[in-house]
Image (cartoon, helix red, strand yellow):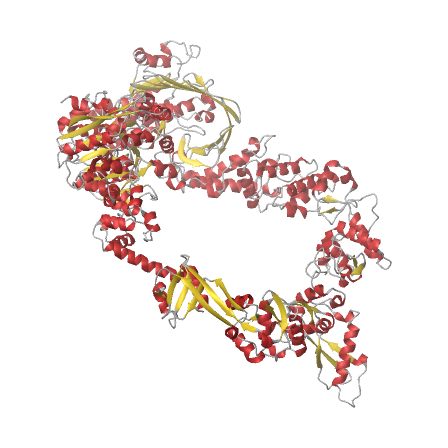
C-alpha cells in the first residue's frame, strides 16, 4: 500500500467516462473488427490463433514482466515514478503513476500485431500484453482517460451474432467499456490503487494454480530491472494471500551511478551501487531488415550495468528481462536482442543481433576508464569478457571476440599513472613463473612502479592483483601485436634515466630475486642495472664489478660501483646480497703476477697464495693460466722448502696425508689446506699425470746418453758414428713427473708406479740419426721404463722390492710365495719380469730359498718348497717345524704330508715335517728331493665305544647313492659314544680324541646328534668334493623322505582320532582345548585317554582342525598349505593324510562386483500391512523437498522385501533421463549386504520393470562405476563408503536419488554421520530421500541416543499411518503372530548362575551395559550351569533345530563338544571361525545336518533359519536391541517358511552388585498372552 501522501485525493470523476476519446476508439475499433470478420471470416481463426500463440508461447509465463515493462514505459516522462503490483487469491493488479492511455494506445492494445514502442521504450501494451490471456479470460484496463475490458464469452457471443463459426474466437479484439467508479466501489483493492494511479490493469485469475505461479514470479522478480528504468523510482510487489509478502525496490541516482535498495517484508538489505552505461545505436539497413518487431525504431538502446560488489560472478544477457544466456562479462548486458518465441534465447545468425553485439562491445570498452578507481586502475579488466576458451555460449563467444577486438584497438589498459592507453602504446612487465610466489611478484612489480622516474608507458601494477586481470591484459597486448617484456627488458627500462636512484630500486628487485632463489634470478643478474663509477650500467655480477676500498690503486680494466650507491645504506645492503665486494684481493694478485716472480722468497710466495685464496680458486686459476705463470709458481712443501709445481705432489695416494716421509716432495697440507682445489686446477695431483713431456726434465740428459750409447752399439763396426746433436729420440709423452722417482721413499715409489695412469704407460720409444736416413729407427726403452728400472720400487705380494727381485702378474696364482708385482702387465713385460716359473732366474730362486730359512710360516714354506722342487734340485737345507721348534735340516730327513691331521700327529711325535698343499706335491718332493712319507714313520689305531651296530652309509644319506661312482658304496657308519686314535712312532706311543676315523670299510663317528657336521667330516675324509649347499640339500632330501614316510603312516590309519594322535600327540591337542572341557568330561565319564582328547578336539574344531593346528603340524614336519580354503593344495594335503575333503576348508564363493538382474516373472503378493508400508515409503521417495523416514518391523516380518518393493515402484515412475541415477543401500556387514543383494535379485525378477537392474557390490576391495543402461543399485558397507564417498571418482554416487540404511539403529555413529553428510544428508539439509530399516527402533535403554536416532530419520515412522497410529496396531508382534508371519512363542526359564563381579568388571558393565569378556568366560566355565543347559537340550524332541547363544567362544566350543559326546550333532561358530567353515556350518544347520548350532556374537544379524524350533539365550543380555535380534532368528511363522510355534529358553543368571534386569524381561508380552 502506498502512503496517504502519495495517493491522489481527487474525486471519482477524475476517471473519464464512456464518452472519452479513448472510449470512442475502443467502440469504433471493436465494431470495425466485427465488420472485418463479416467481410472475411478467416480473420476470426487467424486472430484467435495469434492470441493462442502469444498465450502458449514465450509470453505465456511473462505476464508480470510485461505488465511492469508497460508501466515503466509510461513513467518515462513523469516524475516520482511508482509501480505497484498486488496479488490476491482471485486477482492480479498492476498499477502505475505514469501517463494514462491515449487513443492510439487503445488502438494498439486492440490490434493484432501492432506496437507503438519508440527508442528506449521496453513495451507499451503491444503484443506482450496479450500474454494476460494465460492467467485471465476477463482482463480489465482502467486509465484516467478511459476504462475498458474484455470477456472471452462476451466476445464470442458478439462474433456468433454476426457470423456462424465453430472454432475458437479471439478475446482481445473486441472490448467493452467499463464504469470505473462503479467497478472500484465493488473492489476495495482496485479502489485503493485508483486513488493514486494513472493506470490499473486488473486480471481476475482463472484458478488458484495461476496465483501460485504468479506468486513465484513476484517473489523472484529481478530487482536489477530497476537500474535500467530509474524513472520507475519505486516498484512494489505484494502478495496478499495467506501469509502476506511485500517487496519494495527503490532506485535512485543520476548519470552513470545508480543506487538500488530492496526491502523484503520490512527488512531492508544493504544498498547496492551500480554503474550503468547506455548508448543508442543506429544500425545498418540490412540489420533493420532482420529486426522483426524492432524494425520501426530509429535507434536501439544498449545498456551495461555493473554492480559495485559481487561482480566476480558470471553475467547475464538481458532482452529487457533475463534470458537463458550467461556471459563471462560481469553484470548485465541489456539490449533489444531479437529472440525466439520463448523470449529466453537470442537468435543466432541474425544480422540485427550481430550489429547490436558489435555496438555493445564498443560500449563496454568505452566504459572501462569510468570503472577504474585511483586506488585500482586495472579493476575493469576483471569485468570484461574472459578469454575464448572460457565462453559460455555462442553469444558470449561473439561478444568476447568483439570486445577483444575493440579493446585491442582502443584505450583499455591503464599505464603507470592510471591513464588508459591503447594496448599497442604500453608494455607489460614479465609474468610470475608458475612455480613462483605470486605475492612476492606483486610486491616486486609494486617496487618497480614506486620509482618516480620510471617510464610511464608500462601497464599499471594493479593488473597483478588477480590472475584474471593479468591474463586479459596479456591477451590484449598480444592482439595488438605486442608481447610480454623479459625480466631484463623490464629492469633495464627502469634504469633508462641512468640515475643512481633508479639503479638502487632495480638492485633491490634483483637482490630480492636472489634471496628468494627465484626462477628469474639468473636473467635478472644479466640485466645492466648497476651504475658504475664511470656512469655506465652493467649487470650486478659478482667478480665483474667491485666496490672500491681506500687502498685500491687505479687498476685499468677494473669496474667499480658508483660511490653514491655505496654510500646509500640500503643500496649497500643490496650489493652485499649480490656478492659485490671490494676488489683488493684480485687487484693485488693481478699486480703480483704482472710484476713477475724473479726475486720471490718464501714469504713472498706465502703472500701470493693468500691473495689467490682471497681471489677465489676459479678466478685465480683463470688469471694465472692466462698470464702464463703456472710453470714459475712454487708451493710450500711439508719440509718448508718452496718447489715448482712439477717437482712435488699433493698429499694423498702416493704420499699419504700426515705421512712423516717424503716431506720435501709433498705440498704442505696445513698451509695449502684451502688451496687444494686450486692446485688441482693448476695441474697438480696426488698421483702421476697421464701426459708429461720429459724432455725438459734434468734427468732426461742421462736417459738420452744411455740410449745413444745403446744406439751406437747397434751400428755396424767400421761405420761412422753420428754426432749426438744429429740423433733424435722420439715417442709419446709418458706419465710423469718421472723425476720424482729418484727422491721418493721406496714405499712412495711403489705407489707412484702402481698408480701410473693407463694412457701414460708408454713402454717404447724410437731412436734414429738424421745422418743415416736409410736406417730403420731403433726401438728403445721409453723414459718411463728407464726411470722405473733405474729408480723404481715395486709393491709385490711379499712387500716392496727392487725391480730385479720381482716377478710379473702372470704368476699371480703363486703370490703367497713369489714376489708378484702389482703393476700394469705391459709395464711388467717391458721391465723383463718373469711371467712363468721357467722364466725365473736362478739368482731370484736362491734369494727366495735363503729368505725361507728365516720364515716360520709353515703353509707358505710348504707351498714354496713344493713349487721350487719343480724347477730346482734339492737345496742343502730347508726350514721346517719339529714339535714346537723350527729347525733347518736336509730335505731327506723331513716328512712331507698334505693332511692336516697327519701334520698334527707328526708335530706331536716330534718329527721334522713339512705341510704341503696337495698330495701331488708330496709325491713331487719325495721323488725330487728324497723327502719321507707319513706312512714311513707313523702308524695309527682307532679305539671306539659304541652302543649299536654299523649302518650302511648309503642308508644314512640315500641321495649319495646317485653321486658319480657311488663313493659310499660298501662303507658302513658306526656311531660312537667315545672315539680316540693311538699313534705309534719311533719315539713311542700316544693317544688323542678324534671326531671321525676309518678302519677298512667302517667309518667311526663320535656322534653328537649333528648329521650336517657328520656329512662335512665325511666330505673331508673321503674327499667327496661336496659344497656346503650340497650338504644341506642331501640332509633336506633325507628329511623329505622321512616326512613322506610319516604321511604314509598317517594315511594308513583309518580313525581320525588316531591320525591326529600320530601327527600331534595328546598333549599338544589338549593344550588347545577350551578351559574346563576336559575336567567336565572327567567329572562325568572318569579318566580320559588320548583318544578321548582327540575326540574332543574334533568336536571343538570340526573340519577346521588342521588349519587351527597349522603351526604345531609344521613343527612336526607336516607341510601345511598356506591357505586351507578348499583349494587344490589343501585338498591334496588332506587326501595324502587320508582325511575327508572338508578338512581342506571351503572356498569362499567369489562375488562379482556387479550383478545384472532381468525381470519380471510371477511372485506372491505382499500382505496388506506390507502394502500400507510400501505406500508410506513411496511418500518419502517421491517427496519434494526430500523427506526422511524409518521403517521398523520385527525380524521376520519382511522389512527388506517391503523396502525393495517400494523402491521398485518408485523406479517405475522415473522419467527416462533419471533411470540410471543410482539408489544407494547401506549396511554394516558384508553378510547384510549380500543378503540385500539376494533379496533384490529375487524381488526384481518377479516385480521389476522390463529393463535390467545393475547391482554394484561396493565392499572390501570391490569398486563401483556409474551405468548408462537401465537401473542402478549400489549396495555398500558403511566402512567402504567412508573411504570412497568424498573422492572425485565417486562424485556420481554423491548424487544418489535415494539412500536406504539397513539396521538403521546403528546409524548414529560418527562414521554414518560423515557418510551421510557427504551425501548431502545433514541435520539441516536433505538433498534426497533417506529411509532407515530396523527391527529395533531404539538404542538400548539410552533415551538420548534413541531420540537422536528418531531425529536422524525426521521423526517419521513409516510403520505408522500418517495420523500416527501403528499399522500393525499397539502390539505388532501379536498382530504378526495372528497373521502367521511370526510364530507363537512358548517360553521357558532356566536357573542360572550367581556371578560376583570385580570392581573393574562392574564399572565396565555399568558404562557399556555389556557383560565384560572375563565375566562371560567365568559363566561359560560353570559346570553346573552347563549341565542344566545340556540336560534341557537332551529333553527336547530329537528333530528340533536349536540355536544356542553362548557366553563366549570357548563356551560355544565347549557346549558343541559336550553335546557331540551325548550323540547330538552340534557345531560352534564365532567371528574367529573361518568364513567358509562358518557358512558351511550354518548351511548344515538349515539343512538339518546339524541339530544344535552354538554361536557367540555372530548370528544376531543377517542370518535366516526359518525352521529353528528353539532358541536358547545363554548369554546374559541387557540390550533390548541385541535380544530382539537373537530371538528374531527363530520366530518366523509358517507364512515365512517357519513353524507355528517357537520355544524361547532364557537363562536367568544373577549378576551380583548390578540391579538392572536382563533384557528378556521386557519381552514377556510375547509369551504371557498365551
Number of numbered labels in the structure image: 0
Q: Nearer the viewer, residue 491 or 874?
A: 874
What residue appears at the point 75 percent right and 77 percent down from the top-left corner? 729
Res 131 → quadrant: top left
- Residue 1421 pos. (x, y %): 28, 32
User: In the picture, which quadrant includes the N terminus?
Assistant: top left
686 and 238: which is toward the camera? 686
> Could you tell me if residue 223 is visible in this image?
yes
Residue at the limit of the structure toward the right, as seen here: 599
Residue drawn at the location 23% of the way across and 55% of the way down: 1052
Instruction: Estimate the x, y position of residue 577 in percent, counting from the top left.
Output: 69, 42
Residue 167 visible somewhere in the drawing: no
Q: Position of residue 258 (x, y in %)?
A: 51, 24
Quadrant of image for the C terminus: top left
On the picture, is 1161 further left or further right than 1393?
left
- Quarter of the image where one finds residue 1163: top left
Whether residue 690 sits left or right of residue 534 in the image: it is left
Q: Position of residue 1387 (x, y in %)?
A: 17, 26
Amino acid at each position: 500500500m502506498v502512503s496517504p501522501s502519495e495517493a491522489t485525493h481527487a474525486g471519482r470523476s477524475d476517471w473519464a467516462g464512456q464518452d472519452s476519446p479513448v472510449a470512442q476508439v475502443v467502440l469504433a475499433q471493436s465494431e470495425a473488427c466485427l465488420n472485418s470478420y463479416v467481410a472475411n471470416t478467416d480473420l476470426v481463426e487467424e486472430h484467435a490463433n495469434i492470441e493462442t500463440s502469444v498465450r502458449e508461447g514465450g509470453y505465456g509465463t511473462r505476464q508480470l514482466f510485461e505488465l511492469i515493462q508497460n508501466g515503466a514505459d509510461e513513467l518515462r516522462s513523469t516524475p516520482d515514478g511508482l509501480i505497484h503490483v498486488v496479488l490476491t487469491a482471485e486477482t492480479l493488479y498492476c498499477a502505475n503513476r505514469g501517463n494514462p492511455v491515449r487513443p492510439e494506445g487503445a488502438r494498439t492494445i486492440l490490434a493484432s500485431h501492432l506496437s507503438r514502442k519508440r527508442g528506449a521504450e521496453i513495451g507499451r501494451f503491444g503484443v506482450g500484453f496479450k500474454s494476460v490471456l494465460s492467467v485471465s479470460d476477463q482482463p480489465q484496463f482502467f486509465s484516467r482517460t478511459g476504462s475498458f475490458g474484455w470477456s472471452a464469452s462476451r466476445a464470442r457471443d458478439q462474433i456468433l451474432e454476426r457470423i456462424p463459426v465453430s472454432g475458437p474466437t479471439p478475446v482481445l479484439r473486441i472490448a467493452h467499456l467499463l464504469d470505473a467508479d462503479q467497478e472500484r466501489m465493488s473492489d476495495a483493492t482496485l479502489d485503493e490503487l485508483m486513488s493514486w494511479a494513472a493506470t490499473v490493469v486488473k486480471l481476475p485469475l482463472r484458478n488458484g494454480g495461476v496465483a501460485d505461479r504468479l506468486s513465484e514470479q513476484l517473489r523472484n522478480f529481478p530487482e536489477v530491472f530497476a537500474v535500467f528504468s530509474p524513472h520507475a523510482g519505486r516498484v512494489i510487489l505484494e502478495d496478499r494471500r495467506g501469509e502476506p509478502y511485500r517487496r519494495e525496490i527503490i532506485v535512485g541516482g543520476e548519470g552513470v551511478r545508480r543506487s538500488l535498495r530492496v526491502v523484503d517484508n520490512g527488512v531492508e538489505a544493504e544498498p547496492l551501487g551500480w554503474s550503468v552505461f547506455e548508448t543508442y545505436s543506429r544500425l545498418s539497413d540490412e540489420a533493420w531488415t532482420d529486426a522483426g518487431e524492432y524494425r520501426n525504431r530509429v535507434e536501439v538502446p544498449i545498456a551495461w550495468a555493473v554492480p559495485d560488489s559481487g561482480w566476480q560472478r558470471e553475467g547475464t544477457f538481458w532482452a529487457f528481462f533475463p534470458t537463458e544466456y550467461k556471459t563471462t562479462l560481469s553484470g548485465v548486458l541489456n539490449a533489444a536482442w531479437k529472440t525466439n518465441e520463448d523470449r529466453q534465447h537470442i537468435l543466432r545468425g541474425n544480422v540485427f543481433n550481430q550489429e547490436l553485439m558489435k555496438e555493445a562491445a564498443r560500449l563496454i570498452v568505452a566504459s572501462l576508464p569510468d570503472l577504474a578507481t585511483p586506488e585500482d586502475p586495472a579493476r575493469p579488466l576483471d569485468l570484461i569478457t574472459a578469454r575464448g576458451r572460457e565462453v559460455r555460449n555462442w553469444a558470449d563467444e561473439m561478444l568476447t571476440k568483439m570486445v577483444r577486438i575493440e579493446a585491442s584497438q582502443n584505450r583499455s589498459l591503464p599505464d603507470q599513472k592510471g591513464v588508459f592507453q591503447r594496448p599497442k602504446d604500453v608494455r607489460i612487465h614479465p609474468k610470475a613463473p608458475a612455480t613462483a610466489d605470486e605475492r612476492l611478484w606483486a610486491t616486486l612489480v609494486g617496487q618497480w612502479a614506486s620509482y618516480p622516474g620510471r617510464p610511464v608507458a608500462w601497464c599499471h601494477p594493479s593488473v597483478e592483483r588477480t590472475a584474471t586481470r593479468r591474463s586479459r591484459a596479456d591477451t590484449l597486448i598480444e592482439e595488438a601485436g605486442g608481447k610480454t617484456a623479459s625480466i631484463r627488458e623490464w629492469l633495464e627500462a627502469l634504469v633508462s634515466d641512468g640515475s643512481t636512484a633508479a639503479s638502487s630500486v632495480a638492485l633491490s628487485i634483483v637482490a630480492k630475486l636472489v634471496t628468494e632463489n627465484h626462477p628469474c634470478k639468473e636473467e635478472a643478474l644479466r640485466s645492466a642495472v648497476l651504475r658504475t663509477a664511470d656512469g655506465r650500467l652493467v649487470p650486478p655480477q659478482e667478480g665483474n664489478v667491485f666496490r672500491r676500498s681506500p687502498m685500491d690503486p687505479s687498476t685499468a680494466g677494473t669496474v667499480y660501483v658508483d660511490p653514491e650507491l655505496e654510500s646509500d645504506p640500503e643500496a649497500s645492503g643490496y650489493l652485499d646480497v649480490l656478492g659485490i665486494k671490494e676488489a683488493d684481493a684480485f687487484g693485488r694478485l693481478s699486480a703480483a703476477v704482472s710484476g713477475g716472480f724473479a726475486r720471490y722468497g718464501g714469504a713472498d710466495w706465502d703472500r701470493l697464495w693468500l691473495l689467490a685464496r682471497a681471489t677465489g680458486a676459479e678466478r685465480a686459476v683463470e688469471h694465472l693460466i692466462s698470464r702464463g705463470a703456472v710453470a714459475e709458481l712454487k708451493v710450500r712443501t711439508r719440509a718448508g722448502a718452496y718447489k715448482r709445481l712439477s717437482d712435488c705432489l699433493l698429499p694423498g695416494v702416493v704420499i699419504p696425508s700426515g705421512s712423516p716421509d717424503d716431506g720435501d716432495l709433498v705440498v704442505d697440507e696445513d698451509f695449502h689446506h684451502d688451496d687444494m682445489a686450486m692446485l688441482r686446477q693448476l695441474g697438480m695431483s696426488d698421483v702421476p699425470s697421464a701426459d708429461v713431456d720429459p724432455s725438459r726434465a734434468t734427468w732426461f740428459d742421462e736417459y738420452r746418453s744411455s740410449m745413444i750409447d745403446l744406439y751406437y752399439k747397434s751400428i755396424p763396426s767400421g761405420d761412422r758414428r753420428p754426432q749426438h746433436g744429429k740423433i733424435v729420440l722420439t715417442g709419446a709423452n709418458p706419465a710423469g713427473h718421472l723425476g720424482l722417482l729418484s727422491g721418493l721413499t721406496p714405499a712412495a715409489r711403489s705407489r707412484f708406479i702402481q698408480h701410473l695412469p693407463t694412457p701414460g704407460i708408454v713402454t717404447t720409444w724410437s731412436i734414429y740419426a738424421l745422418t743415416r736416413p736409410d736406417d730403420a729407427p731403433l726401438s728403445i726403452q721409453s723414459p718411463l721404463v728407464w726411470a722405473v728400472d733405474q729408480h723404481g720400487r715395486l709393491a709385490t705380494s711379499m712387500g716392496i722390492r727392487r725391480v730385479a727381485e720381482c716377478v710379473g702378474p702372470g704368476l699371480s696364482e703363486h703370490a703367497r710365495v713369489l714376489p708378484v708385482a702389482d703393476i700394469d702387465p705391459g709395464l711388467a713385460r717391458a721391465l723383463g719380469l718373469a711371467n712363468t716359473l721357467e722364466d725365473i732366474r736362478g739368482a731370484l730362486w736362491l734369494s727366495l730359498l735363503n729368505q725361507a730359512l728365516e720364515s716360520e710360516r709353515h703353509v707358505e714354506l710348504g707351498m714354496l718348497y713344493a713349487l721350487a722342487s719343480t724347477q730346482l734340485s734339492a737345496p742343502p737345507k730347508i726350514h721346517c717345524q719339529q714339535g714346537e721348534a723350527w729347525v733347518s735340516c736336509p730335505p731327506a730327513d723331513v716328512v712331507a704330508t698334505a693332511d692336516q691331521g697327519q701334520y698334527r700327529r707328526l708335530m706331536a711325535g716330534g718329527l721334522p715335517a713339512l705341510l704341503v698343499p696337495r698330495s701331488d706335491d708330496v709325491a713331487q718332493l719325495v721323488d725330487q728331493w728324497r723327502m719321507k712319507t707319513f706312512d714311513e714313520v707313523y702308524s695309527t689305531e682307532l679305539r671306539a665305544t659304541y652302543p649299536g651296530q654299523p649302518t650302511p652309509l648309503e642308508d644314512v644319506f640315500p641321495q649319495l647313492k646317485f653321486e658319480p661312482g657311488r663313493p659310499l658304496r660298501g662303507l658302513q657308519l658306526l656311531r660312537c659314544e667315545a672315539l680316540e686314535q693311538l699313534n705309534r712312532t719311533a719315539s713311542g706311543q700316544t693317544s688323542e680324541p678324534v671326531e671321525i676315523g676309518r678302519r677298512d670299510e667302517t667309518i667311526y663317528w663320535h656322534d653328537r646328534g649333528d648329521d650336517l657336521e657328520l656329512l662335512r667330516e665325511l666330505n673331508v675324509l673321503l674327499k667327496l668334493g661336496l659344497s656346503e649347499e650340497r650338504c644341506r640339500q642331501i640332509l633336506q632330501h633325507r628329511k623329505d623322505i622321512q616326512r613322506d614316510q610319516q604321511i604314509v603312516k598317517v594315511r594308513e590309519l583309518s580313525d581320525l582320532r588316531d591320525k591326529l594322535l600320530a601327527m600331534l600327540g595328546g598333549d599338544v591337542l589338549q593344550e588347545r582345548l577350551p578351559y574346563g572341557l576336559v575336567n567336565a568330561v572327567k567329572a562325568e565319564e572318569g579318566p580320559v585317554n588320548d583318544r578321548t582328547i582327540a575326540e574332543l578336539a574334533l568336536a571343538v574344531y570340526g573340519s577346521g582342525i588342521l588349519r587351527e593346528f597349522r603351526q604345531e603340524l609344521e613343527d612336526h614336519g607336516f607341510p601345511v598349505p598356506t591357505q586351507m580354503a578348499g583349494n587344490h593344495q589343501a585338498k591334496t594335503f588332506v587326501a595324502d593324510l587320508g582325511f575327508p575333503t572338508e578338512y581342506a576348508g571351503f572356498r569362499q564363493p567369489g562375488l562379482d562386483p556387479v550383478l545384472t538382474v532381468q525381470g519380471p516373472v510371477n511372485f506372491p503378493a505382499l500382505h496388506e500391512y506390507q502394502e500400507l508400508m510400501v505406500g508410506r515409503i513411496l511418500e518419502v521417495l517421491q517427496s519434494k523437498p526430500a523427506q526422511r523416514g524409518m521403517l521398523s518391523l520385527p525380524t521376520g516380518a519382511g522389512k527388506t522385501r517391503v523396502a525393495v518393493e517400494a523402491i521398485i515402484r518408485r523406479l517405475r515412475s522415473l522419467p527416462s533421463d533419471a533411470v540410471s541415477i543410482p539408489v544407494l543401500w547401506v549396511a554394516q556387514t558384508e553378510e547384510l549386504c549380500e543378503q540385500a543383494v539376494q533379496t533384490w535379485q529375487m524381488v526384481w525378477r518377479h516385480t521389476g520393470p522390463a529393463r535390467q537392474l545393475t547391482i554394484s557390490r561396493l565392499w572390501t576391495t570391490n569398486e563401483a562405476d556409474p551405468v548408462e543402461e537401465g537401473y542402478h543399485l549400489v549396495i555398500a558397507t558403511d566402512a567402504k563408503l567412508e573411504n570412497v564417498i568424498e573422492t572425485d571418482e565417486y562424485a556420481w554416487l554423491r548424487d544418489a536419488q535415494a539412500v536406504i540404511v539397513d539396521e538403521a539403529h546403528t546409524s548414529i555413529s560418527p562414521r554414518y554421520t560423515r557418510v551421510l553428510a557427504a551425501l548431502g544428508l545433514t541435520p539441516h539439509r536433505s538433498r534426497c530421500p533417506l529411509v532407515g530399516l530396523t527391527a529395533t527402533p531404539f538404542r538400548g535403554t539410552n533415551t538420548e541416543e534413541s531420540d537422536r536416532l528418531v531425529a536422524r530419520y525426521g521423526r517419521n515412522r513409516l510403520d505408522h499411518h500418517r495420523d500416527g497410529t501403528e499399522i500393525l496396531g499397539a502390539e505388532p508382534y501379536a498382530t504378526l503372530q495372528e497373521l502367521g508371519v511370526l510364530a507363537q512363542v512358548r517360553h521357558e526359564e532356566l536357573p542360572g548362575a550367581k556371578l560376583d563381579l570385580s570392581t573393574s568388571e562392574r564399572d565396565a558393565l555399568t558404562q557399556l551395559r555389556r557383560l565384560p569378556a572375563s565375566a562371560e568366560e567365568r559363566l561359560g566355565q560353570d559346570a553346573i550351569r552347563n549341565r542344566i543347559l545340556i540336560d534341557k537340550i537332551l529333553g527336547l524332541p530329537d528333530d528340533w533345530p536349536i540355536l544356542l547363544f553362548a557366553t563366549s567362544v570357548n563356551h560355544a566350543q565347549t557346549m558343541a563338544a559336550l553335546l557331540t559326546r551325548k550323540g547330538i550333532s552340534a557345531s560352534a561358530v564365532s567371528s574367529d571361525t573361518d568364513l567358509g567353515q562358518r557358512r558351511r556350518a550354518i548351511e548344515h544347520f538349515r539343512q538339518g545336518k546339524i541339530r544344535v548350532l552354538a554361536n557367540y556374537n555372530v548370528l544376531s544379524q543377517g542370518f535366516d533359519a526359518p525352521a529353528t524350533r528353539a532358541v536358547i539365550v545363554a548369554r546374559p543380555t541387557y540390550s533390548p536391541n541385541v535380544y530382539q535380534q537373537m530371538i528374531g532368528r527363530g520366530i518366523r511363522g509358517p507364512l515365512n517358511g517357519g513353524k507355528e510355534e517357537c520355544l524361547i529358553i532364557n537363562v536367568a543368571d544373577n549378576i551380583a552388585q548390578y540391579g538392572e534386569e536382563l533384557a528378556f524381561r521386557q519381552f514377556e508380552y510375547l509369551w504371557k498372552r498365551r
